[in-house]
Amino acid sequence: MTNGFCFFFFFLNPTGCSIIVGSFILGFLIVAACSESGGMLPLKEKDQPIARALLDAGCCARCILRFCCVSLHSAYRQPHEDLMCELQSFVNAREIDTSKDSAGKEHRDIPPCKKIRLDSQQSSEKDGKDASSVTKNSDTTDSSICVVCLGMLQHFCDKAFAKKVFSEPACISLYEIDSLVLSVSLPAQLSVREVRNTRDKGMCLGKDDIIQVKEAYKWILHRLVSQELGVPALAKASLLISHQPGCLLFEVSVGFVHPESDGDCHFLTLFPGLSILPLLYCFNRKFPCPPKCPATRCTVQEIRCLHMPIFVAGRYNKFSRALPQTPWVIDGERRMESSVEELITAPLLSAFGADGFNFSSSGREDVDVRTLGNGRPFAVELLNPHKAQRTAEEVRRLQETINKSSDKIRVRDLQIVTREAVAHMKEGEEEKTKSYSALIWTHRAIQQSDIEFLNEIKELNVAQKTPLRVLHRRPLAIRQRVIHTMSAHYRDVHHFCLQLRTQAGTYIKEFVHGDFGRTRPNLCELMKTDTDILELDVESVDVDWPPAVAELESQEVLCSPSQDEHRD
């Protein structure tokens, strides 16, 4: 009987004299139609032979939905036992209807007699027994392990497993989380088994037609994991849109293995670098179709939970001529007690509770070179931070902490940025310009007039072989660089100050002393005397990133995306 209900409403007309009573009867015809065609499964009549063949091959209910190209998320989220029952009803109902239609066509013109009616009753009873037998056999199949997903979509998609995901990794409660993303690693043999099964059943479906195991799995587990943590689960496609500075994005990584069927994909190692899908079709006939029913299900190799990296950027000044940018270690022995990198990252690691970091900057200076002016842009990638939500005021205080920790450096414009923003620091790096100030020594005594010609040199092209001092860590190459301008200021008979504006990546020391002729032209050739550099300062790095930060007093959180916008 069709379910329905009556909905009454009253409308008072403007004169207030009469009341119009209306009623609308809304029937749930879809529910009735679905109950006649195998429950709530979004399957069509054309899917019946595919479903029957896959059931016989030993596929689970969710894999059958995948092969029937069902993309309705809610269908996969039903309990597997309920899915199998509905699927059996769908298949058996079609078979019984087909049998009845065939019998009715043969005896349409023959008047039924008492004996035939008895036979019909016995036949109906027999059909009922056969149907229950089919259901019983299918129940046995349901309890077995799927030949395609190897039990992954059967036994690892319930609330109990979602709770297990967060019971094994330690100290999850210590993380600050406002959204999560699920990543899944599957055994390679799942792809091999999928191709075997579909080719054997005559289903020439492309990769885009079949719902992938990983995709179906995420449809199910996303919601369960999200409910367990109480935060929205994001799809991979939405990460670039939603991941803003300081967002507390948490990654749950689940890896599966199936040692029993590892041999299914050993042939793939014979063709490294080739696409897997064509190889699967080529070697399809070498393996049994459908694939053998496994004796064991997939097992979870690892469950890993970590926070997505947080990126902190700013600019630093270096005032010491005995401070390397990064830890200076030669032959396993440390030469300096500290570095710019360590002075900046130590407070950041503590404040964000990160497990590690990656430090990068727009170029680098030698240990004996100061960085003045507006500083050198840098970025720190904080790995697996436990505390990621920081206000602008907290970041400002963190900058003060760094600056008070040492008089050798100073940080400015400290801020939380996105991964994509960090790329701006490296974009067109060699096309940028940098300004330097150098104290030059000359072997020959000089006068003011001897250095005035340097002020007239513009856009000087220089060819620099990889300097000898860095040849152990950089490949041998000839780099073309441009010195845009020079300005010389006389000091005494053997010294003058030289200011240069050059293309980024120019080796200034080598331009001054020539590096045994590896840089040409050089200052020695221009002045026709030996020259050397005594002091060098970086005056400016012309990279307009990160943006300048004013003194902020706002306590607003840097990133607090709406959870409802990305809820699965």
Image: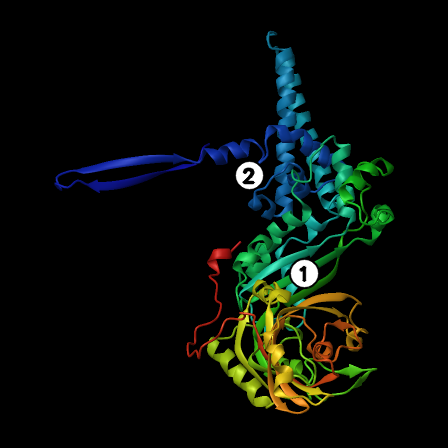
Picture quadrant of residue 321 = bottom right
Disc 2 packing (10 Å; few <14; some 14–19; many ≥20) = some
Residue 298, position as x, y percentages in the image: 76, 53
Residue 370 in view in this figure: no
Tag 1 residue: 253
Distance of label 1 from label 2 (alpha carbons): 32 Å
Residue type beneath disc 2 = Met
Give the SS element for disc 2.
Answer: loop
Give the SS element for disc 1.
Answer: strand
Picture quadrant of residue 379 = bottom right
Please name which of the two marks, 1 or 2, marks the residue nearer to the observer. 1
Which residue is depicted at the point 64% across and 47% down? 216
Residue 136 in view in this figure: yes
Residue type beneath disc 1 = Ser
Q: Nearer the viewer, residue 147 or 105?
A: 147
Which residue is depicted at the point 80% across and 49% down? 273
> Which mark is on residue 311?
none
Q: Is residue 12 above or below residue 521?
A: above
Q: Nearer the viewer, residue 429 or 70?
A: 429
Residue 328, position as x, y percentages in the image: 74, 83
Q: Nearer the viewer, residue 13 or 32?
A: 13
Tell me which numbered mark, 1 or 2, is placed earlier along the sequence.
2
Tag 2 residue: 40
Q: How is the image coloured?
A: rainbow
Disc 1 packing (10 Å; few <14; some 14–19; many ≥20) = some
